Image: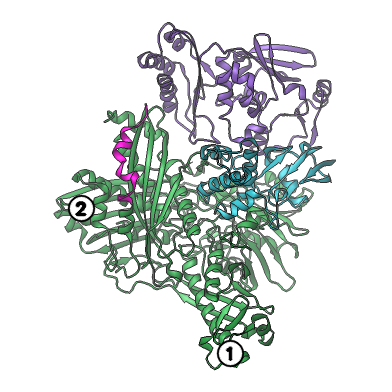
Amino acid sequence: MSGRFPRVDALSKACGAERFAADHYPEGCLWAGAFRPGAAHARVLAVHTAEALALPGVLQVLTAADVPGTNLQGIVHKDQPVLCGDVVRHAGDPVALVLAESREALERALGLLRADLEPLPAVFDPREAMRPGAPRVHAGREGGNVLMAAEIRKGDAARALAACPVVVRGTFETPRQAPAFLETECGVARRLPDGTLDLIVSTQSPFRDRFEVAQALGLDPLSVRVRAPYLGGGFGGKDGATVQCLLALAALHADGRPVRMAWSREESFTAGYKRHPSILRCELGADRDGTLRALRCRMVLDTGAYAHLGGEVLELGMEHMAGPYRVPHVLVRGFCVYTNNPVSGAMRGFGVAQATFCAERMMDRLAAKLGLDPLELRLKNVLGPGEENACGVRLTGSTEARACLTALRGHPFWTTRREWAAQAPARTRRGVAVALAHNAMGYGGGLPDMAAAKVELTEEGRFRVYCAVSDMGQGNVGGHAVLAAQALNQPPGELDMVLPDTERCHPSGSSSAGRTTYTFGNAVLKACAAMTDKLRTRAAQFLLCDDPASLVLESGRVVWPGAGKSVPLALMARFLPRDDRVCVAEFVMPVAREVSGSSRGFVLGFPHLLFAYSAHLARVELDELTGRVRVADYFAATDGGGVVLPQGFEQQIQGGAAQGLGLALMEDCASRDGRLLTPDFSTYLVPTALDLPEIGSLAVPSHESSGPGGLKGVGEVAMDAPLPAVASAVEQAAGIRLDAAPLTPERVLAALRRTRKKKP
Amino acid sequence: MTIRFTLNGRPVALDTDPGRRAVDLLREDLGALSVKEGCGTGECGACSVLLDGELKLSCLLLAAQLEGREVVTCEGLGDQAAPHPLQAAFAEHGAVQCGFCTPGMVLAAESLLRENQDPDREEVRRGLSGNLCRCTGYVKIVDAVQAAARERRGGRRKK
Amino acid sequence: MTRVLLPATLPELWEALAASPGAPLLAGGTDLLVRLRARRQRPEALVGLERLAELRTIRRQGRSLRIGALATHAMIAGHPLVLRHAPVLARAVSEVGGPAIRNMGTLGGNLCTASPAGDSLPALAVLEARVELLSAGGTRLLPLSGFLLGPGRTALAPGEIVGAVRVPLAADFQVQHFEKVGRRAALAIAVVSLAVLARLEKGVVAEARLAVGSAAPTVLRCPEAEELLRGGRLTLSALERAAKAVRVAVRPIDDARASAGYRRQVAGNLLLRLADL
């Protein structure tokens, strides 16, 4: 691999040579598919399998009765059946699993399966679901439909608000956004003769998957092997079991044959995990000069039929409701509620995308009410290093939010905003606006954010890094290669990178929460440091050098610069037994120790210590005739700590902003009575190349001393600012306030017609 | 039924159901795994191939329709030892993140550059408008296509 | 197993249709194959038209263009004859889907799918195109309005195919306007669309033809609006009057993409774009 290609995986992917989980067709494999009756809430009286079983090429049709173990999967709460027996709780719930010899036989069989269902009263609005007497999604569950009710409190918000000279209010709604990765949920599984269940899955959580599968199916977790190739996208939707338990179940019934499962796009929409729709109500109080005083707000999340990571999304969202600002008095109440809608789970931004819409639009409201410049209002209140955030966490990590804002202030898009708007062509309104996002990194309090990296000097004298966190496109494998190469002073192309394999690598948590390059990268650096120490010491023996610290690693050898001598790594490797050529090191992300706020009701994850910051600017054009919003230009200034991989940094910012713009403009898994109105790519719209602008990115100077190479995770933060930035720009353009996303042409036109505001 | 066609320059003869989707045939029987399925309904472009030189969607083509034709997939443009300029440009310019859309994107770009050797950014976006990417926001893909176009023209810029 | 018949001549086609009377006709596949997948249908046989080269030509025939039913949207969008004599059609079909869809989808297919949102249809309507239907028994010619009967319904009889579309030369219409409103800029189904032909004499409208797509069961001409424009200039106030008439004429529905109210409002609004031409 030459230095021409900054990422280790880029060329193989560009040539179409990289093998994803979707690309495995093992010899003799069976085809597995789930039958999902499509009722939002119903009692299952019978599943008729005889017709399907009679088809040639159909080997098995499994139902709940065939599931050993608990038949319950879940990440924190085990509430989701692998195959539903008595009740289906959302339109994607499966009641049968078909094993067939071919794709065609599988399709035919799925078309012949029938279920006798008795509809049950269902609930689709989370506010309704919270009322006493609402239909229960999980019968007999203590707490009813409320998965989690929580509170974050600092100071006395009620009293402070009452004393504020200025209070602004707002209610906001965000939709169900689908991760819509190009590679759907998929994998292969096989039960080996020794009883091991061998899975290759497009998964963000290979290590945890073992436990989810084992607990659901009554197996020993250590008898489950999971390998994660490069994912064709994840964005949170592949965190936790998607196909894993179904595949494992199939493998148990496949008589040793491999089984393949790949969800269709329609199935991915129906059964996959999506962003929590939210309803956010907020009151923000301030002094007349714009100094923020108090925030009181309420977040309601629709978690759909199963918990997945709903409580954790609630926690993180609530933690971000005040924005990255100094707010002395805060009261945030949150509810994560079951409904009979499709399942909400983890998606990039994880509650923060929702919260940021609210927080930033409230800042705009306040600026408008006070007649203050929205950027200046933010600068006035933005947190700096060492200050206490809205949850009472002292920001001891890098905090360059101010620099992000000042980068926008000086940008020509901002300084020329009035002239640009005045030059709007016929029938077009133009607006320019900014939004500031912050996004915590890592798992947060109560859940150790740990990684264990193994670095090996192979028998041939090459370095091998055992990556344990999935690469879903963020380029962390490449990032770890660069970090290791720098630490070991080797060309990155000379390193062997092993992709996550629970048998060869060490548990390091999921690929999520913006944590992978930070946590695993730190572990890699520690392991490389240990390896370097070891090799210098051993080389010193070879070279008869009495000062190992004076030796240096170079490409393929250890060198004694003073004496002009060296020893090849390949030679050293021959003399070292395997367990002497391996270094394993762990790293745990630091957590907040000084917390003056309090929380109630969270299980895991409160609070967080380290944050990335990103200030975005959107130049927007609005067509008066159709209501269509076009983002003409976009710019993001981000604090991601030190930048180890400039191209990788930009990739994350541009990609995150693109998904945020999709949320702002067009993405919505609309449903009626629990059935998706958008079950495919013709109805669920993601932006094409003609829908997005050029996205400029600037990394503001910063350094996170606890991060490898000074970096912080920037995988999520860029996702959070586009929606408020675009909504604000639309308001600037046409004087209309849209508090529900996405900002569809229809909503915009309706607002325009209501306002009938004259062009300035 | 036997279907005969050329795949990346090599003759192929396959006994198969003529009503089978070309994407399945290419992936499962012929190992052309660069051709991906993203949706099955022609809405994402991940299954793109060049059929007699024209950009088409293999999820909406039947095996019988390949008879006597030339099929080119991303593997046919180049490999890691000798990458096609577009493949190299994608890798170099950060146009590849998860990589699942990439083979289809490369073929769409190739199809564009055969028609237009010096596309501006809007023209590149239009040429790629049938290929969804969920990771990149398209900016670096446009960069890569323009860079490859420049290289093909021998480094001369007209626009 | 599905039998896929690919006749190369018209006589072979009639034979194939006679032998497999229920077999769906496959042109570009961009509608048929998607529909079959959605309905989980596996027909016993399909008759593919792609080898009928004579149905793919585009040529001038007297005072019309004869566009073969198998001409793809890409072919039509770039064809010199179309660009010269009926540019509104080129504009319309260049909005279909994306590049690959345009390489595959055909004009005949767009007609036979008869979606209320079909992109070519408003252009064909203002061009007053006629549809040439072929069968073993001969040829018949129908006006577009006689061919499109409702959403997904055409006058195609069993054993019949669309052979060609005849488009009267329209280069004398200086205004050849098409706008499609989708919920995104590519790969979008029209939520509402408008095609306009206007012939101006010294700035005064001698003749105007308007057709709205996706706002009625089939593409809709708006004679009342056309009449309002005739004899005047394309001023904003004239267009606003005509827009009102368009809004009265359309019969849109609510669906997942948009509400009837939005379609009604925008169908009229699109006319105002002409003030900026």
Q: Main secondary structure of the magenta part?
A: helix
Disc 1 to disc 2, C-alpha distance: 66 Å
Residue A577 position by quadrant: bottom right
The answer to whether residue A677 is seen in the rendering is no
- At 33% across and 41% down in the image, what residue appears? A432
Residue wearing tag 2:
A285
Residue B81 position by quadrant: bottom right
Task: Using a 10 Å C-alpha cutoff, classify the residue at mark 1 as few (fewer than 14 neighbours), some (14 to 19) or many (20 or more).
Answer: many
Check if residue A421 falls in the magenta segment: yes
Which callout, 1 or 2, points at the residue further toward the start of the chain?
A: 2
The magenta segment is A408-426
Disc 1 is attached to a residue of which chain? A
The x, y position of residue A550, in whole percent, is: 52, 86
**Which color was chain C given?**
purple
Task: Using a 10 Å C-alpha cutoff, classify the residue at mark 2 as few (fewer than 14 neighbours), some (14 to 19) or many (20 or more).
Answer: many
Check if residue A165 falls in the magenta segment: no
* Tags 1 and 2 both on a single chain: yes
Q: Is residue A142 above or below residue C132?
A: below
The answer to whether residue A105 is seen in the rendering is yes
Residue A535 position by quadrant: bottom right
The x, y position of residue A233, in whole percent, is: 56, 54
Q: Is residue C3 above or below residue A258?
A: above
Residue wearing tag 1:
A540
**Which color was chain A given?**
green
Q: Amino acid at mark 1?
A: Ala
Q: Amino acid at mark 2?
A: Gly
**Which color was chain B given?**
cyan
